[in-house]
Image: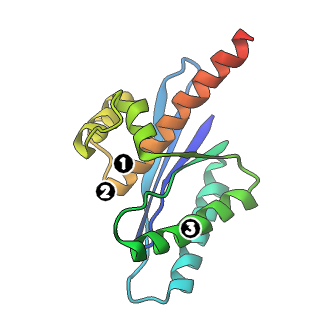
Amino acid sequence: MIILGIDPGTATTGYGLVTEDEAGEARLVRCGVITTAPGVPMPERLLAIHRELTALIRDYAPDAVAVESLFFGRNVTTALTVGQARGVLLLAAAQASLPIYEYKPAEVKQALAGYGAADKRQMQEMVRILLDLDDIPRPDDAADAVAVAVCHLHSARLQRLIDGAG
C-alpha cells in the first residue's frame, strides 16, 4: 500500500509518499514540495500544482491520498488561497479515482506523537523515528505531508483490525 500525504498550500504544497511493507513497517518512498512563485497569477499557480500532483500520482500510483484538513486561523486571505490549492489537489486525486482521507492537524499529532497538541519539532522527530530515517524530512511542508501519510497508514491498519474482528 502506498499513501500520498499532502500538506496543501498555494506557495508550497508538501507531499510525502509512504509505503507499508509485508511486516507492517512504514517506509518513506519520496517526499518534497511543489512550489509556485508569488508573482504568478493564481490560475497559473493552481494549474502548476495540479500538473505536478497529477504527475506524482501517475509515477507512483498511490492507493490512497491523505490530506490535512484546512485549518482556519485568523488570516482569512491565507485560508482562502490554501482552500483553492486544496481544491485542486482533491480534484487531481478524484480524477485518478483515488480514495481521499482527510485528517485534522490534531488527529495527525495524536496518531504520531500520542498528543494532539504536539509541537512541530516533536512531530518531525516522530516522523524520523517511525520511518527509521537518518534525518528529518525537509522542508517542513514535506515533513508535514509525510506525517499525514503515516497517520493514514495507522488509521488504515486500525480499520483492518476492526474489520477482521467482526
- In the rendering, at what x and y percent does residue 143 appear? 36, 48
Residues at discs 3 and 2 in contact (Cβ within 8 Å)? no
Residue, x 28% and y 38% (percent of image)?
118
- The residues bearing labels 3 and 2 have C-alpha atoms spaced at a distance of 17 Å
Q: In which quarter of the view is residue 155 placed?
A: top right
The N terminus sits in image quarter:
top right
Foreground of the two, 85 or 44: 85
**48 displayed left or right of 117:** right
Identify the residue position indicated by label 3 in the image. 52
Q: Label 2 sits on what residue type?
A: Pro
Element at label 3 = helix
Residues at discs 2 and 1 in contact (Cβ within 8 Å)? yes
- In the rendering, at what x and y percent does residue 154 appear? 52, 28
Identify the residue position indicated by label 2 in the image. 139
The C terminus sits in image quarter:
top right
Identify the residue position indicated by label 1 in the image. 143
Q: In which quarter of the view is residue 115 placed?
A: top left
Residue, x 41% and y 77% (percent of image)?
77
